[in-house]
Every structure is written in structure tokens, then in C-alpha cells.
């Protein structure tokens, strides 16, 4: 168990390093750099030269990567390429805001998904299931930016209930994000509910059809005791992984949502930093998101193994 | 008659009431956050947030509602006989937001700071003919030029040439101290910056108590914010979005003719565009009205390849109908009886570029001009494509006639994007600058424009009409170009 944990952590670290390399190479390959992005039409001659020397862009790419990577190892993400601000300071509030958005969406989405998924599974192929499943398919297939725009149109432009765009500055206290944060939460919760509830539904159906559930029913155990005592505990296990994946998706996938709603989180910062060619900031954010992805998945696997003894024995026997 | 009297009394009472009313309400506006973390309140830096600086600081000379120079911090100006020395009389009793008095030494400081050869400011090119700035007395400044220049006041109207307190260069980026109608309360480029009314503003106290200038980088998000009433004004409305505003009484749409233009630019130093006949032929095949209708929904002012806007007092009145046969004849004369091929480089940096290129492609085909459209990324367009490839799309914001022709067409100018080089044209511009008589000067500038229509390598089909959307609660917002708006008059219900 411990050896496996260590192995997984090591693999996770390698993934994170690879991700940072790929991101660096990707942004480096885009035409233009931090100086041409800033200077636009004036990006010529001496002005461009001065700017590049100023920002250290005249050094070869791999030297800049090494420089950054060695700093990052000691927890120092360095300075942003053009703002001359420390990245830790810039990222701090943004990370908090994204976590705020993600956790609100989770608190709304996960219970809702479990409830709807169980309902759809138990009433399989009947009207509750059909309604829930159709809505889920719609929520999954309509791109977030479309549903976001529709929600803004309905709730902010037509009804005027909530503000459409978040105008709060990044460092504002949490309370100031309400009520503008409601629409982004709704969009995120919609998509994640759809994904989770479909897994819940199919695993409820599967367990309901299992031998032990049928045996319990045949022996005369009341229906709801079968559901709560035998079906749900077993059906909800596979959901842990889906929930974990969704959490990871939330942190990366908010990029689009944050841009549409002007939400001052990590996602929008990532977009801005890419268009500014601000490599150090892009790298730092990619690193954070990759670490969260790896971390959450690792935790989910561990949780599943703790909850399901069969998985553990299977692995130990293999070794 | 009686009713007329009553209503005029009512109007008089309302106007009088307005003039003495305390400023009330908050006016909200967005800015694009174009320079991210480098955003600043230094009016001459590249990262200046002009939506804020234009309300905090005043210029020496400002454009009036017709775009003609009018007093701002300078009350009057005179030139010597050959227009190489200008004397400005400054407004007296003006105070900066920090309480200090405005005087000639502040003008000397602000201008010298911009003219410093070590300054990286893009605004320097507007006034680089100034070689000396001298305080004659506390309220008089003398400017010495290295060339005769009759329209210096027009250059001083530049939206970046704002006066700041002497010695404040190192702090201005954060403090934003000026003499404008609003004072800075909080600067937060990525969030909300707050400005409050300056009750001592020399042109009268502002109508609104507060202005909030909010950074919203995404254009779609800015539009949503306006539709939802979270901001009161947004100027990037496209022709396609017009319908959304026309149908509702919650918004007002201002249509403002500007001198901004988009066009197709050929490099005159590359064959076959070295031949002015080929350049003219390429420009003759454009049906400008059709292009305007298809690309901009019909709102704009037709242009005949001149960079001078419709409101500019020097604009030449030209006509340029589509002429396919004439173009064919010119091409044949230049040695291309079978027409020419050209690659046009397009990015989506400017939304309307791809449409403009496609319309041109169709219009040019009958004349034997075979256009191939090459799509390139928006990133790095200005550094890798523009002025590098033979034919590209381009765009320019409004400039006064003289500045536009100098920056874009003068031989050897830094931004002479078509590499246009014509000694006759350069001489016309020089003599126009020297001419102090307005009518004669106008004649010279018109001649220069006619020369461009004959020989230039830049297709300028029209000048853009800007659509500015506001919420219905905004009153008295001048329906003119941004740099002429009198912000202290704006009120909100």
C-alpha cells in the first residue's frame, strides 16, 4: 500500500514536470513574444530591442526554462514577465476566487447529481428518468459559453434578477462576490451535475440488477431497505472517481466560464497571461492546475481503495 | 404663445437647476485592459488607461464639437510670421487635484518629459517638431519648432498630451493628478477604478458624483455588462449587434462618424506594385459602397483612398466609382494584359478584415486581379506580417490630416506601411505646414490628397462610423469622438 502510494506520487510529479515543459514549449512556439504583444505596432527596432533586454527575452528559451524551473522548485515562482510583480502575490487571490467558485459549484452540483441520479436509476425508463436524462444530455452537449450567454440573457438582461458580469476586483472580500457569482455557479453546476448523475444512474441500475439485491428482494426485505442498505453504498463507490475527475475539470474548465463572466480567477488570468505572452505566469498557473489534477485523482484512488477492500488485495497479490 | 412661454420657462428652470445642482449618481464605463498588468495613469506611457486619464487631466488645447482647436488649459495662442514660434496664454487660477496651482512651469515639465529623446512614449511623434519649451512668465509659454507648422494647435489636441504637476513624473502612473473634471479616488486597472467629481473644475462642476471605470478584457463580456445595465457606456458595438439596441428603449445608440479606417495596403517597393498604374488599378476595382454595405452594414463614410476623416476641415471632396475597364486598361498599359496575382494577408485581429478581403476578392476578379487570401494568426500580426508581407490588411485610428499624411505616407516615416516614396507629395506637405493662410493651406492639403488618390498603394474604402451604446439613464453625453467629449456635462438619472 505504502509502496504504491509512493509510486503514484512519483508518477504524479513526473506528469507535472512534463506538463510544465509542454506548456512552455507551446507558448514559446506561438508567434510573437511578451514584447510584441505589448508594443503592438511599435514593435520595431530599438524599442523592441530595449524591451527584450528588459524582460530577459534575449536569452535562449531553454535557459529561461531552467531559470524558472529551479526557482519553482524552491517555491519561488519568480516575477511576472511584464508587471514586475511577484507571481505568488498575483496568483494568491485568483486561486482563492477560483476555489470559491469551484466549491460553491460542487456544493450545489454534487448533492443535486446524487439525488437526481438515484431518482433516475430507481425509476429507470419511466418519466422521472426520461426527464432527468434528457436534461442531462442537454446540459452536457450545449457548450458552456452558450448556456452561460443564455443564462445571462434570461436572468440578467430580461428578468434583471442578478448581475450578468462579475465586476468585483480580484482582491475583494469573499462577500462582495455575491450575488454576481450565482450565474457562473449555475453554469458550472449544470455541467457537472449532468456528468455525475449519469454515472450514478447507471451504477444504481447495475447494482439493482445484481444478485444480492435481487436475493434481498426475494427474501422479502422491504424495497427502501434494499435501496438504502444494499444498493446505494455499493452504487456510490464508483462515483468517487467521477466526482474527483469533475473537481479537477472544474479548476481547469473554468477558463471559459471565467472569461465569459469576467470572473477574476485563475482561468481568466491564464488566458490574459497567454495573450500577454507572460510565460512565467502561464507556467505557474499550469503547474497549479496540473498539481490539483494529479492530487485530486490520487486522493480519489486512495479513497476508493480504502472503501473497497477488493481493490487493495488485487494490487498486493499482483506484486 | 402662452404654452411656448411656459415651456421655455420650464426649460430655463431645468437648465438653471442643472447648472447649480450637486453632482449626483454614478456613471460606469469599461476599459479593455489592453495592457494588463502594465496599465498605468501616466498619460504618455504605452499602458495609459485613456478612459481614466481623459477624465483626470486636461490638455492645452482640446477639439470642440466640430473637431476644431478650442481652449482647454491654454486660452489663446499666436504664431510668429513663419509659424516656427508659438506663444500660448494659459488659463489662470487653475488648481491641480492636490491643491497646487497650475502654471507655465508645469507645461514646460509635461512637454519636456514627453520630448525627452530617451522617452519611449508613442505620443512623442505627434509633437516631435517642438524643439524648445520656455516659460515666458507664470502664465505664458513659448514653443519653438524646428519647422514652420501652421497647425500646431491641432497637434496639441492629441488625447495623450495631458498636463501633470511639475516633478510628478515618477508618481503620476499611480496618483493620476491633473486638472480635469474628476479626481482619482482609487486606481485598480484589473478591477474597478473610482473617480470623484472635482468641484473646482475650471469649466464648472461635473454632473455626476462618481465615475467607475471597470477593466473588462473580453468584448463579449463588456456587451453583456451593458445589456444587463452594469455599465452605462460601451463603444465597441459592431454593425451586426446594432439590431439588439435598436429594438429596446433601455438603451440609446449613438452613431458617430470617425476618421478611423481599415484598408488594404500594398508595398510600393515590391513588384508589381512599384508601378503606380498597377496600384491605381487595384484600387479602382473596389466598389466602395457595396463593400461598406456588406462589411459594416452601411454605416460609414465613403473614402477615396485618403486617410483624412469626414469631419476633418482639410478633407478633399473626391469621387471614385468602381471602374473595371479602366483598371484592365491600366494593367495592360503597365505590361500585365492577363492581370496579376496577389496574396492578401489577413488576421482576425480586426473583426471586419476577413470580410473586407473577401469582398475585395470578388470585386477584383472581373478585372483579372486574382486575389488569394492568406489567413495568419492575430498574435504577432504587427511584428511579423504588417509591413513585411507584400499585401496586408491594416487599420488606423483618426489623426488630423497633416499628422495622418506624415505618419503614413511621408517618405521614410517609421509607419509608412506602403513604403510610399514621392518627393512631390513630401514637398506639398512641407509647403502646407508653412502656409499660415487657412484657405491656401487647405488648398495644399487637398492637392496632396488628390495626389494620393492618383498614386498611393493603400486602398481606403471608407471611414468607419463608430457605434456607442449607452443605457437610457445617461444624459448629455456628447455624440462626438471620444477625445472631444466634455465629460463634466454628463449626468445620469
Image (spheres, helix red, strand yellow):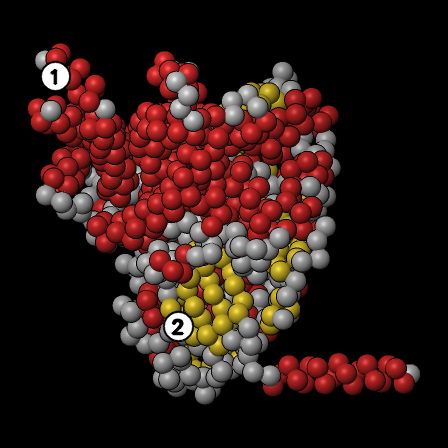
Q: Which residue is identified by label 2?
A: B185
Q: In this rendering, would A44 be left or right of B89? A: left
Q: Position of residue B397 (x, y in %)?
A: 53, 51
Pointer 1: residues within 10 angstroms few (<14), some, or many (20+)? few
Quarter the C terminus of chain A occupies = top left
Q: Number of numbered discs present?
A: 2
Tell me the element at label 1: helix
Where the N terminus of chain A falls, by quadrant? Answer: top left
Q: Nearer the viewer, residue B237 or A107?
A: A107
Query: For this view, does A133 lie left or right of residue B101?
Result: right
> Where B272 falls versus B82 (above or below)?
above
Residue at (54% x, 81% y) in the render:
B205
Please say whether residue B370 is visible from this viewpoint. yes
Rendering quarter of residue B151 = bottom right
Answer with the quarter of the image where residue B195 lies. bottom left
Task: Name the residue: 55% across, 47% down.
Answer: A152
Work out whether A302 lies above or below A278: above
Residue B411 visible in the picture? no
Where is residue A110 shown, x and y percent of the image? 39, 38
Chain where mark 2 sits: B
- Secondary element type, mark 2: strand
Seen as rendered, the residue at the extreme top is A318
Would you name the residue on which mark 1 appears?
A: A316
Percent position of residue A268, x then y? 38, 44
Are both tags, 2 and 1, on one chain? no
Q: Nearer the viewer, residue B224 or B304?
A: B224
**Residue B398, how many percent across, how many down?**
55, 53
Amino acid at each position: 500500500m505504502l509502496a504504491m502510494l509512493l509510486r503514484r506520487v512519483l508518477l504524479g510529479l513526473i506528469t507535472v514536470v512534463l506538463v510544465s515543459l509542454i506548456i512552455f514549449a507551446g507558448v514559446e512556439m506561438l508567434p510573437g513574444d511578451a514584447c510584441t504583444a505589448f508594443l503592438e505596432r511599435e514593435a520595431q527596432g530599438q524599442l523592441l530591442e530595449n524591451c527584450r533586454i528588459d524582460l530577459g527575452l534575449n536569452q535562449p528559451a531553454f535557459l529561461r526554462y531552467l531559470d524558472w524551473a529551479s526557482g519553482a522548485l524552491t517555491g519561488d515562482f519568480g516575477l511576472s514577465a511584464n508587471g514586475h510583480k511577484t507571481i505568488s502575490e498575483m496568483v494568491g487571490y485568483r486561486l482563492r476566487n477560483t476555489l470559491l467558485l469551484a466549491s460553491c459549484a460542487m456544493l450545489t452540483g454534487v448533492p443535486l447529481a446524487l439525488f437526481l441520479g438515484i431518482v433516475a436509476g430507481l425509476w429507470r425508463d419511466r418519466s422521472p428518468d426520461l426527464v432527468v436524462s434528457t436534461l442531462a444530455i442537454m446540459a452536457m452537449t450545449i457548450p458552456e459559453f452558450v448556456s452561460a450567454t443564455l443564462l445571462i440573457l434570461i436572468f440578467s438582461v430580461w428578468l434583471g434578477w442578478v448581475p450578468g458580469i462579475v465586476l468585483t476586483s480580484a482582491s475583494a472580500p469573499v462577500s462582495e462576490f455575491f450575488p454576481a457569482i450565482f450565474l457562473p455557479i449555475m453554469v458550472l453546476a449544470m455541467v457537472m451535475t449532468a456528468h455525475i448523475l449519469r454515472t450514478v444512474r447507471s451504477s444504481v441500475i447495475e447494482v439493482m440488477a445484481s444478485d444480492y439485491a435481487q436475493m434481498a428482494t426475494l427474501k422479502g426485505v422491504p424495497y427502501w431497505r434494499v435501496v438504502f442498505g444494499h444498493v446505494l453504498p455499493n452504487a456510490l463507490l464508483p462515483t468517487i472517481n467521477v466526482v474527483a475527475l469533475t473537481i479537477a475539470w472544474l479548476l481547469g474548465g473554468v477558463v471559459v466560464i471565467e472569461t465569459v463572466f469576467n470572473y477574476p480567477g485563475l482561468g481568466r488570468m491564464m488566458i490574459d497571461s497567454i495573450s500577454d505572452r507572460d510565460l512565467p505566469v502561464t507556467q505557474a498557473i499550469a503547474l497549479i492546475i496540473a498539481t490539483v489534477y494529479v492530487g485530486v485523482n490520487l486522493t480519489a484512488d486512495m479513497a476508493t481503495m480504502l472503501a473497497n477492500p477488493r481493490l487493495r488485495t488485487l494490487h498486493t497479490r499482483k506484486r | 404663445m402662452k404654452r411656448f412661454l411656459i415651456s421655455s420657462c420650464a426649460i430655463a428652470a431645468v437648465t438653471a437647476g442643472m447648472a447649480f445642482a450637486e453632482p449626483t449618481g454614478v456613471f460606469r464605463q469599461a476599459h479593455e485592459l489592453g495592457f494588463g498588468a502594465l496599465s498605468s495613469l501616466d498619460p504618455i506611457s504605452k499602458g495609459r488607461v485613456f478612459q481614466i486619464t481623459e477624465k483626470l487631466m486636461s490638455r492645452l488645447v482640446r477639439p470642440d464639437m466640430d473637431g476644431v482647436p478650442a481652449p482647454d488649459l491654454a486660452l489663446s495662442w499666436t504664431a510668429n510670421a513663419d509659424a516656427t514660434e508659438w506663444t500660448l496664454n494659459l488659463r489662470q487660477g487653475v488648481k491641480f487635484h492636490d491643491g497646487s496651482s497650475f502654471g507655465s512651469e508645469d507645461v514646460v515639465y509635461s512637454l519636456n518629459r514627453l520630448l525627452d529623446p530617451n522617452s519611449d512614449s508613442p505620443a512623442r511623434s505627434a509633437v516631435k517638431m517642438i524643439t524648445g519649451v520656455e516659460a515666458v512668465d507664470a502664465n505664458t509659454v513659448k514653443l519653438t519648432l524646428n519647422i514652420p507648422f501652421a497647425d500646431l494647435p491641432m497637434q496639441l489636441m492629441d488625447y495623450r498630451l495631458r498636463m501633470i504637476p511639475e516633478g510628478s513624473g515618477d508618481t503620476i502612473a499611480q496618483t493620476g493628478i491633473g486638472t480635469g473634471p474628476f479626481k482619482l479616488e482609487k486606481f485598480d486597472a484589473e478591477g474597478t477604478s473610482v473617480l470623484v467629481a472635482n468641484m473646482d473644475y475650471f469649466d464648472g462642476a461635473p454632473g455626476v458624483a462618481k465615475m467607475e471605470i471597470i477593466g473588462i478584457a473580453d468584448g463579449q463580456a463588456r456587451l453583456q455588462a451593458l445589456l444587463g445595465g452594469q455599465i452605462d457606456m460601451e463603444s465597441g458595438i459592431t454593425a451586426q449587434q446594432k439590431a439588439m439596441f435598436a429594438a429596446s428603449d433601455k438603451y440609446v445608440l449613438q452613431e458617430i462618424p470617425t476618421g478611423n479606417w481599415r484598408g488594404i495596403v500594398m508595398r510600393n517597393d515590391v513588384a508589381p506594385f512599384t508601378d503606380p498604374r498597377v496600384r491605381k488599378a487595384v484600387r479602382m476595382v473596389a466598389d466602395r459602397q457595396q463593400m461598406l454595405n456588406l462589411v459594416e452594414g452601411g454605416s460609414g463614410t465613403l473614402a477615396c483612398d485618403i486617410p483624412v476623416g469626414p469631419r476633418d476641415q482639410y478633407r478633399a471632396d473626391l469621387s471614385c466609382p468602381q471602374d473595371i475597364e479602366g483598371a484592365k486598361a491600366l494593367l495592360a498599359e503597365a505590361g500585365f494584359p492577363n492581370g496579376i496575382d496577389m496574396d492578401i494577408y489577413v488576421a482576425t485581429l480586426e473583426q471586419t478584415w476577413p470580410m473586407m478581403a473577401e469582398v475585395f476578392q470578388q470585386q477584383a476578379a472581373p478585372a483579372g486581379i486574382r486575389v488569394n487570401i492568406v489567413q495568419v494568426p492575430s498574435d504577432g500580426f504587427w511584428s511579423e506580417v504588417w509591413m513585411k508581407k507584400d499585401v496586408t490588411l491594416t487599420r488606423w485610428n483618426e489623426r488630423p490630416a497633416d499628422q495622418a499624411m506624415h505618419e503614413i505616407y511621408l517618405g521614410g516615416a517609421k509607419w509608412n506601411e506602403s513604403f510610399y516614396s514621392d518627393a512631390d507629395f513630401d514637398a506639398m506637405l512641407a509647403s502646407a505646414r508653412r502656409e499660415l493662410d487657412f484657405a491656401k493651406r487647405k488648398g495644399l492639403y487637398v492637392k496632396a490628397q488628390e495626389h494620393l488618390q492618383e498614386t498611393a498603394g493603400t486602398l481606403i474604402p471608407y471611414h468607419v462610423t463608430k457605434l456607442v451604446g449607452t443605457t437610457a439613464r445617461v444624459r448629455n453625453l456628447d455624440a462626438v469622438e471620444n477625445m472631444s467629449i466634455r465629460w463634466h456635462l454628463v449626468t445620469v438619472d
